[in-house]
Image (cartoon, grey):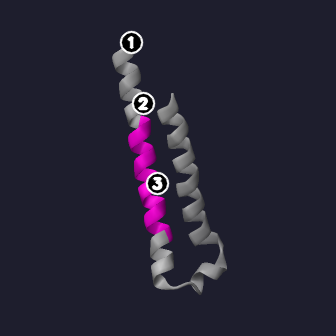
Amino acid sequence: MSHRIVAVLLLIVAFAAFVAQWMFPFLDDAPWMLRTGVTVVGVVCLLAAVSLWMRGIANRGRSS
């Protein structure tokens, strides 16, 4: 159960990172490294969330 809670929190962070890049015009003036960093953080959070979510599914399948 805790895997899914962390996964949802990471999905929210990833979503916020991608929305921030798309919506906020101040990122257009930001340095390239900052924009790349926001993208990398979003991708890492998304991949970690999917991994945790799948781990939770696998653990639930074994306990049944």
Going by the numbered disc 3, the residue's amino acid type is: Cys
Residue for badge 2? 56
Asked whether the residues under the numbered discs 3 and 2 touch, taking CB atoms below 8 Å apart as contact, a structural biologist would say: no
Provide residue 19's location: percent of width, then percent of height: 60, 64
Residue for badge 3? 45
Residue shown at the point (51%, 27%) measured from the top left = 1
Bounds of the magenta segment: 38-53
Which of the two labelled residues, at mark 1 and mark 2, occupies the earlier sequence position?
2
Mark 2 secondary-structure assignment: helix
In 3D space, how far apart are the residues under numbered discs 1 and 3 (Cα atoms)? Answer: 29 Å
Which label is found at residue 64? 1
Q: Residue furthest front?
A: 2
Which of the two labelled residues, at mark 1 and mark 3, occupies the earlier sequence position?
3
Magenta stretch holds residue 29: no
Residue shown at the point (45%, 80%) measured from the top left = 33
Mark 3 secondary-structure assignment: helix
Q: Is residue 4 above or below residue 28?
A: above
